[in-house]
Image (tube, rainbow, N blue to C red):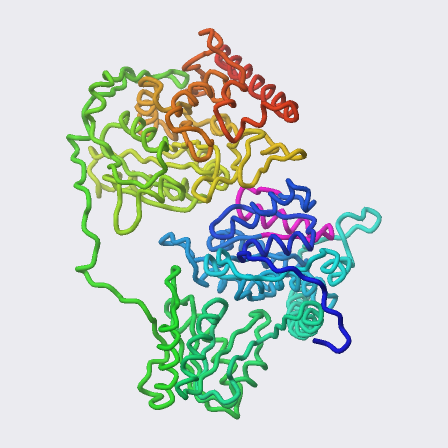
Amino acid sequence: MMSGAVRAEQVERFLTGNEMVAEAAKAIQFHFMGYYPITPSTEIAQLIDAMRSRGEVSTVLLPADGEHGAAGACFGATTGGARVLNATSANGLLYSLEQLPVQAGSRLPMVLNLVTRSISGPLDIRCDHSDLMFALQTGWIILLAATPQAVYDMNILAVKLGEHPDVRLPVIVASDGFFTSHQRQSVQIFKNSETVQRFLGPRLDPVTSLDPRHPITFGPYMNDPDLINNKYQLHLAHEAALRVFSDLCAEFEALSGRRYSALETYEMDDAETALFLLNSAAETAKDAVDRLRKTGKRVGLLRPNILRPFPFEELKRATHKVNSVVIGERSDTPGSTGGPLSHEVKSALLSDHHCDVVAVSRVYGLGGRDFKEEDAETLIQTGFDAIQNPSGVPSFGFIGATPGTPHSIPPSVLPPLSRDQLSTKLVQIEQTPEQPKSKVRSVVADPSQLVMRPKRIAPGHGACPGCGIFSGLDQFFKGIEGDVVVLYHTGCAMVVTTDFPFSAHRISYLHNLFQNGAPTLSGLVEVFHEKKRRGEISIGEDITFVMITGDGGMDIGMGPTIGTALRNHRMIILEYDNQGYMNTGGQLSYTTPLGKETSTSHVSRTTHGKAFHHKDTASIMAATGIPYVFTAIEGYGTDLVAKAAKAQWYAQNSGLAFGKILISCPLNWSAEERYGQEILQRAVDSCFFPIFEIENGLTTLSYDPETAGKKIPVAKWLEMMGRSKHLLKTEHSQTLQQFQDEVDRRWRRLRAMSAHPDL
């Protein structure tokens, strides 16, 4: 502690890493947070939104339509001189990656919490550092937080570091997904947020986009030599950041009593070999170092607290007298002898002409594989072996991995369906339209016959009790004749049916992430037809291509889906609507109804749940001019089966077909699973979810509750929805009226469309 300094009062808590981000945010009082849910960083926005509902923060939270949009919103907010926060993981970082160099090059500070996670594919939600390594070239400062306490402290330091006049750069705070983000430890937080506010001081911006009397151009077009000068200035800012970081850490130590340095050294005074590890693995390795020290082995540990700028000189000094260094990486660069971390460490060692260090690197812990004390001891022993026999120890390798053999390929769990099983003629198209405005009619067999049709999805998924996804999909597929290839967006339907090495799918299945499913399937569709044209596939062969989306897939994936629709590929897109991001824990999606309580739209005296109306996906898709659009609910007679048959006909003969089905989700709705069908019917009878179809621009109501004398107010539906029942209380009456008015407006518009051929 600095002489004469008075340590600020702190309180002890028992919190996780994600909770500590929220506590830091509460103390900092960011102006703005743009975000998009992705495991394991999702909790951060949830926690801050809950704080906002309690009046503890005034931060504006913007739920973007994807990580790229969230990054853009954050960039825009920083141009206005705001203190800005974001949080993401894995492919979320990659989706926003294009925006990161833009912000660094524009020298606009903000804080991004990267809760590290393995990058798809294959999809894995657990920790490694493959996402972090992609951030190295973005121009952002990168701080590392090995413990929940460090997460809190680094978020505070990140604000002051990024805003320093010699730096002015955005900062990433990286912590390990699940290991640190969900690990609960005893921590200390400042008792008064004023302590943090005084430490940070006011944000001072040399320019802002919110001063019309002093206009400024952000992001101009640059040529030589301006661009190289810009990049040189960015380089100088990073050089300054290392010095500023050390100064701020000393100031923060005086305030908190906690010490941080650019490179933490542990038992390095007389070490013969040293481990170089990041974040939580280094905490585990300390125990191994302590144990081996007791046996007389001279081993030490190196752990950086800042990765960009890299603590180059500090590493040279710390390793000057050791004989070997073992670099442990939770990532790999395929085709190279080590990941980015290995090359950076080795280049530092190589530049120290006065040391002769043997450096080896090992990849560990990919996909969340635990790193244990025994693993640390294995790495340490590798270091001693390299001292004894430098040429006999491979410079690079993996620990805890095997390449597999042909005999380890997973067996086919389910027998494939035969063509005879799939072509039952239980559903047929009765007529072929000859004019663009014509309609087709599907004839469906009796339900008692339909139940005999084999299921394309076998029993064995792990969905929640009462989940309507698979009963809804089963009804849909009963209307599809012949062979099918399906693509599933990431979401509940994908996750619970494909837990490797098992699969519940009896047909060919593809997966791609939320934002790119439709283009992926469109590419396969075009290859199929081109191969038929070339004679590589029989002319008589036919396959129906279906993309299944839901859980917010029509938010982050809306843009690419519209592009696919405008190109009018011969395929079907089916959206199951459970009104939330259920595969990430029930955050709001754009299909979530107004006022609904979710983990990112809390309800209190001042907040009323989701703040904007639900997305009318079917109308958006109809506006693209595709030949067929429909909505349906599961269990409404054979309506869904008939519409599936029509969708298949259009996909095979005309172009893209889009369907949206409302499915029950007891977990998201906080409703008893036994009432699922009644809730769906009330959604239809209240006109919240009207069922209709649009063929070549002509709208037909499949069911008109008003004509049938069954129309009910929205409140009758909401009274069965546990997470929306608060709207029935007096204090939320205005929100309920807004909801009812919008539902009525959309219903009047739909009825007018059905009555007029030009609407």
Please state which of residues 66 and 248 is positioned toward the viewer in this rendering. Answer: 248
The residue lying furthest to the front in this view is 12
Quarter of the image where one finds residue 323: bottom left
Task: Write the residue at 49% across / 54% down.
Answer: 89
Asked if residue 571 can be seen in this view, the reply is no
Work out whether residue 163 or residue 234 is closer to the camera in this orientation and state it. 163
Residue 526 magenta-highlighted = no
The answer to which quarter of the image holds residue 445 is: top left
Residue 546 point in image, percent of width and height: 33, 35
Instruction: Say above or below: 428 vs 145.
Output: above
Residue 76 belongs to the span the image colors magenta: yes
148 relative position to 735: left or right = left
Give how far across and how far down residue 365 sits, in percent: 38, 65
Say which residue appears at 46% left-offset and 53% top-offset. Answer: 91
Q: Position of residue 452 (x, y in %)?
A: 19, 25
Give the x, y percent position of residue 116. 48, 59
Q: How many marks?
A: 0
Vertical arrangement, residue 495 with respect to residue 652, above or below: below
Q: Which residues are magenta?
A: 62-86
Q: Residue at x 51, y 78 (%)?
A: 302
Q: Is residue 714 left or right of residue 225?
A: left
Q: Quadrant of the N terminus?
A: bottom right
**Residue 736, located in which quarter of the rendered image?**
top right
Q: Is residue 444 found left or right of 128 in the rendered image?
A: left
Task: Give the camera-side residue of 39 and 66.
Answer: 39
Is 412 drawn above or below residue 658 in the view shown? below
Residue 300 appears anywhere in the view: yes
Q: Residue furthest bottom?
A: 354
